[in-house]
Amino acid sequence: MAKKVAKVGVKKESGYLYFVDAKGDVSRAVMARGKKKGKAKKEKVAKVGVEKESGMLYFVDKQGDISCAVMARGGKKKKKKAKAKKKVVKKKKVAKKKR
């Protein structure tokens, strides 16, 4: 379950991706659509300065506030496929008999 960290109240516009950047501020970038090349320019929307904890995922929720949740680590373990073992047969040298 996510908990609110800071109330910001950012009004979201369609076509933008809103995220919490490395400094703890709310930023946005134009969403990639089609085959546009190049990096999207980031712009700061609100200065908040949230201190991030390791193991937590920070995001901008529907109300425009910063929330965090515990990161899912590990997930389901994948089953290992049984490898078919190949038998290596060595040929024996047969000595020729003298008559």
Image (cartoon, grey):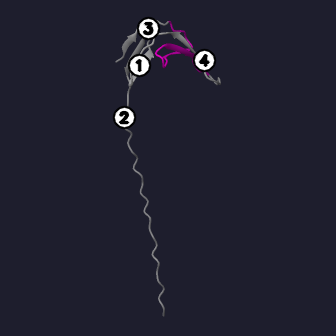
Amino acid under disc 2: Lys
Q: CA distance from mark 4 to mark 2?
A: 36 Å
Depth check: give the residue in front, 4 or 63.
4
Which residue is denoted by mark 2 in the rendering? 76
Which residue is denoted by mark 3 in the rendering? 63
Amino acid under disc 4: Lys
Question: Which mark's residue is nearer the viewer, 3 or 4?
Answer: 4
For mark 1, does the 10 Å Cα neighbourhood hold few (<14), some (14 to 19), or many (20 or more) residues?
some
Amino acid under disc 1: Lys
Question: Which mark's residue is nearer the viewer, 1 or 3?
Answer: 1
Q: Residue furthest bottom?
A: 99
Q: CA distance from mark 1 to mark 3?
A: 20 Å
Point out residue 88 in the picture as x, y percentages from the top left corner. Answer: 44, 64
Which residue is denoted by mark 1 in the rendering? 52
Amino acid under disc 3: Gln
Give the magenta-colored segment's residue range: 11-33
Magenta highlight on residue 97: no
Instruction: Give the residue displayed 46% in from the left and 10% down from the top.
Output: 48
Q: Which mark is residue 41?
A: 4
